[in-house]
Amino acid sequence: LVGMVGSALLFSWLLTDFHQLKLVRVIQGAALLSIVLNCIALWKQESRTPNEADASAEHLDFRRAWRRLVERSNMRRFLWVVGLGSLAFSMQDILLEPYGAQVLNLSVSATTLLTALLAGGALAAFAIAARRLGRGSDPCRLAAMGLMIGIVAFTAVLIAAPMHSTSLFRVGTVLIGFGGGLFAVSTLTAAVYFGGDNDNGLIMGAWSAVQATAIGGGIAIGGTLRDLVDRFASQGVFGPDLMGPAVGFSAVYQLEILFLFAALAIVGPLTKPWQRVSSKGNAKRFGLDQMPG
């Protein structure tokens, strides 16, 4: 995220005086730097040592382990929350910049800056979540707060078009990053709590798989839905008042708000056990020692 903020600021500055050749050069430079950084990251990676695993630990095949996991109380509900929330926050992933350009007439430099605003909001959410969770706050309540902030954020982006307000659009972008970051880190922490002492690896794998699937599906759904609605709108299917470039984007943002409301309704019952634990002053703290591995 720090890389996204820094590179977005740099690209925004480089593309202030925009022309096609400069854009190609910036993309080539970013690609080259990515290759170099990945090669550095791969250098002297630790080798796997499966022989050092605990020989007394129970070994289950994946189907049995997964069945036992989802049979836990509220586990299916938790995974639904992760999936719906991740889906909702990711549908806008490839739409914010075109929305700013096509609907609000922002320049290439200004739309590039949106990535920095989005990542900056997420970084702020991580810092606040770390502080709150370190004091024993309920991670499911924090996740619900992230969902509510997301609803406000998408509403702001949605009404920025009829108000012709680029400032409101930028505020909504920051809040999308903030709400999404708060939701992600809170559900990850909740997953560690659900995992207990023996199943951290499995539950975090489940969290990661559900989140990654939802994000990929959300990006595909958002782009496809925007194109379909925009095509129908341009043909006058929805009437003469709904023929502008904002119609397709608005359909996606409204759907995201509905998904956020659905996730908010599902996450409600999950807060009860955490509230009971917190009231006794025995809330579990989350740290690197709880990570699998």
Image (cartoon, rainbow, N blue to C red):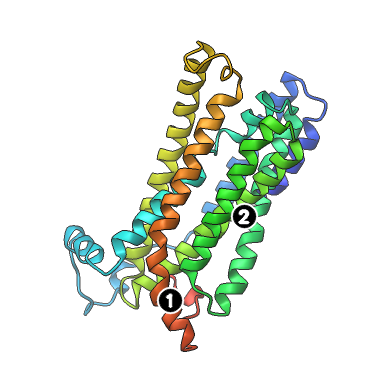
Q: Nearer the viewer, residue 273 or 2?
A: 273
Q: Identity of the amino acid at label 1? A: Trp
Q: Residue at x 31, y 71 (%)?
A: 199
Residue 32 percent across, percent down from the top left: 63, 36
Residue 282 percent across, percent down from the top left: 46, 87
Mark toward the start of the polypeptide (2 vs 1): 2
Q: Residue at x 50, y 75 (%)?
A: 286
Q: Identity of the amino acid at label 2? A: Phe
Q: Nearer the viewer, residue 171 or 293?
A: 171
Instruction: For residue 292, say whether it is visible.
Output: no
Q: Residue at x 20, y 74 (%)?
A: 58
On the picture, is 159 further left or further right than 72? Answer: right
Residue 264 percent across, percent down from the top left: 45, 56
Q: Which residue is mark 1?
A: 274
Q: Quadrant of residue 190?
A: bottom left
Q: Quadrant of residue 162?
A: top right
Residue 126 percent across, percent down from the top left: 60, 62
Q: Residue at x 25, y 65 (%)?
A: 69
Q: Which residue is mark 2?
A: 178
Callouts 2 and 1 close, C-beta under 8 Å: no
Image height check: is 169 above or below 290? above
- Mark 2 falls on what kind of element? helix
Residue found at the very far right of the displayed protein: 17
